[in-house]
Amino acid sequence: MSASRSNILFLMTDQHRTDTLGCYGNPCGISPNLDALAAYGTRFDRWYTPTAICTPARVSLLTGQAPFRHRVLANRERNVGYLEDLAPGSFTFVDALRRAGYNTGLVGKWHAGSDVDSHAAGFDGPDLPGDAWHNPVDAADYRAYLAEHDLPGYEISDRIRGSLPNGGEGNLLAARLHQPLEATFEHYLATRTIEQLEKYAEDAHRDEKPFFLQLNFFGPHLPYVLPDEYFDLIDPEQITLPKSIAETFQGKPTVQANYSAHWAFDTMPLEVTRKLVAVYWGYVALIDHEIGRVMEAMRGLGLIDSTAVFFTSDHGEFTGAHRLHDKGPAMYEDIYRTAGIMRMPGGVQGQVRDEFVSLLDCTATILDLAGLDPSPAMDSRSLVPLAHGAHPDWDEDIICEFHGHHFPYPQRMLRTTRYKLIVNPESVNELYDLQCDPDELLNIHDHPEMAEVRQALTTRLYQRLRERGDNFYHWMTTMFEVGGVDYDPTQSGLDDSTYARRSDSPQPAGS
């Protein structure tokens, strides 16, 4: 296999907290296979999702475009009027790989469009519902797998849920699954991935035809539905609850307290929260076990030395942090910072990088590994040099965005080494000092002593949004001091007295 046309295995989870993995500090030894991947590759400590919501993040991976640019901004099941599919003719890395002679496969969760499913997008793989956000246990191919192996069907008990503000039952958060490990949807997905690997390995060895294969687990997204050995794997007494359990929402956008009520956090005792976190960690352990099966199959097929392997997730999960579950209109590290691990042939082993990188950057990296032009992935930058140990110039901050879930709710975030600024047009803005307050409990946006930092960060965010072409900056033009305005903010072209056309606008202070 040519070094310029690497095989690629892309492992992806959904709603996965970084702190569940041993290589990111979890003490319970539940992720030995992903820890080994990090030991033989590169672990990125500042890896962020472009937006903490499934469909927009996954479309960003497909296109290498930020959500504001591709405009698929919400999940179908909670669509609030945004586009549900990419515009016809949009660039995707899948099309580029197929034109270059790659086999391209996807096993598992698609959730990147409504009318366009994974097959229409150019992927081989089992026929699963394209818009499913949880394990589609009624899917025909899964039922056929159970029948083929004489395995029992889906059945649950020990449901965990709270009470909604209107008195109804809360969303299902976890349950005990009455199936053996071999019957779980996760085992099924790994089995189908191994079968696809075997087909692609034949082509790779016989015809030197490279492949891209993506395994997308539906978990550890809630509800956490696990068989006994994983439901009870972790003793809840081992769980140290996050400090942000003490969240009061004082000085925070009101929507956060509303979301806490929606997820019924306060209607469940802390003992239940401990059990939920324990079961969530058990879910991660189950997925890690299945990833181990796939990696062992890779070794058996002789593909290890010719295949680049990625691991990441679309976004994180609250799991009780900030008295929240799931994700939503709150740009905390719990859901925006994710794990990012990459092992490639010839790459440095066991290194840890602290550059700000993104799920978006996977698109250009995939194209680079295939020997293709990464420039069509316009908001993406190849991570190949970082994996090889180089130290190119790199942005010292990162932009993330959000557009709504259940209802429209626009947000923009600037994350620097020390600070995080969040602009919420509907509500109060947020500023956190992550050096002094890593749990993001104290909003210091309006503290007088933060005026200089706030001004520098606001100007930097404004300028970066303008450079990207993200029209959110228009809101900031009128609401913040952002230096000299060098365009007509009315966008009418009729009044040039409201702005100064000059090229010497003040530059932002460092942060």
Image (cartoon, rainbow, N blue to C red):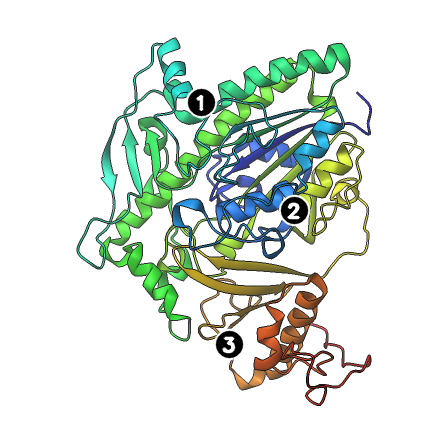
Q: Quadrant of the N terminus?
A: top right
Q: Horizontal and vertical percent for residue 156?
A: 25, 30
Q: Earlier in the sequence, mark 2 or mark 3?
A: 2
Report the disc number at residue 444. Answer: 3
Question: How far is the residue under mark 2 from the one under mark 3?
Answer: 28 Å
Mark 2 closeness class: few <14, some 14–19, many ≥20 residues within 10 Å? many
Which element type, helix, strand or loop, lies under badge 3? loop
Q: Horizontal and vertical percent for residue 185?
A: 41, 25
In this rendering, does residue 284 appear at all?
yes
Residue toward you, 59 or 262 = 59
Q: Which residue is mark 2?
A: 44
Taking 444 as reference, is 211 left or right?
A: right
Q: Quadrant of the C terminus?
A: bottom right
Mark 1 closeness class: few <14, some 14–19, many ≥20 residues within 10 Å? some
Q: Earlier in the sequence, mark 3 or mark 1?
A: 1
In contact (CB < 8 Å): disc 3 and disc 1? no
Give the foreground label among 3 and 1: 1
On screen, 316 above or below 367? below
Q: Which residue is mark 1?
A: 187
In this rendering, does residue 348 appear at all?
no
The extreme bottom residue here reads 497
Amino acid on which disc 3 is placed: Ile
Q: Earlier in the sequence, mark 2 or mark 1?
A: 2
Q: Horizontal and vertical percent for residue 458?
A: 62, 75
Q: Horizontal and vertical percent for residue 236?
A: 33, 43
Which element type, helix, strand or loop, lies under badge 2? strand
